[in-house]
Amino acid sequence: MAKQQDFAEKAKKATQEKGSKCPKCGTIRVPTLYVQSIRSAHGSYRFNRTRIQICKCNEKQVYA
């Protein structure tokens, strides 16, 4: 059988922040979907989707 989790462990887990810390600024990185619209050779638009990690260090570069 699996180990039962008590309320104290659940409360402790809920207060922890999810994600990895940035080595430069120490804040938690937030995964964000970055979409670029690129014009194709046929004249229509294509959308490139990539997941990037945003923290205080690169926030201005991404959102600018």
Image (spheres, rainbow, N blue to C red):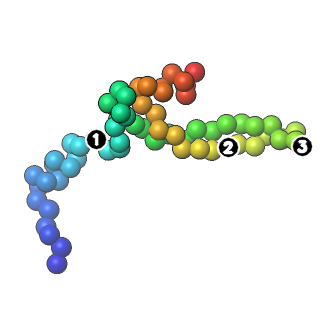
Image check: 39 left or right of 51? Answer: right
Q: Name the residue beneath numbered marker 2.
A: 48
Left or right of 48? Residue 61 is left
Q: How far apart are marks 2 and 3 (CA)?
A: 16 Å
Q: Look at mark 1 in the image and give the residue it sits on.
A: 17
Q: In which quarter of the image is the N terminus?
A: bottom left
| Residue 62 position within the rendered picture, expressed as x and y whole percent measured from the top left | 55, 28
Q: How far apart are marks 1 and 2 (CA)?
A: 29 Å
Whether pointer 2 and pointer 3 mark residues with C-beta atoms closer than 8 Å, the reply is no
Viewer-proximal residue, 2 or 25? Answer: 25
Q: Which quarter of the figure is the C terminus placed in? A: top right
Residue drawn at (75%, 37%) of the image: 38
Q: In this view, does 57 lie above or below 52?
A: above
Residue 11 location, x and y as percent? 16, 48
Mark 3 residue element: loop
Image quarter of residue 44: top right
Residue drawn where x is 10% and y is 52% of the image: 8
Across and down, in percent, residue 40 comes to 83, 41
What distance separates the C-alpha of mark 3 from that of mark 1? 45 Å
Amino acid at the residue labelled 3: His
Check disc 1 and give the amino acid type.
Glu
The residue carrying pointer 2 sits among few (fewer than 14), some (14 to 19) or many (20 or more) residues within 10 Å by Cα, namely few
Crowd class of label 1 (few under 14; some 14 to 19; many from 20; radius 10 Å)? few
Q: Is residue 23 above or below residue 4?
A: above
Q: Residue at x 42, y 31 (%)?
A: 55
Disc 1, SS: loop
Q: Mark 3 points at which residue?
A: 42
The x and y percentages for residue 29 are 40, 37
Mark 2 vs 3, N-terminal side: 3
Q: Which of marks 3 and 1 is nearer the N terminus?
A: 1
Q: How crowded is mark 3: few (under 14 residues within 10 Å), some or many (20 or more)?
A: few
Is mark 1 in CB contact (under 8 Å) with mark 2?
no
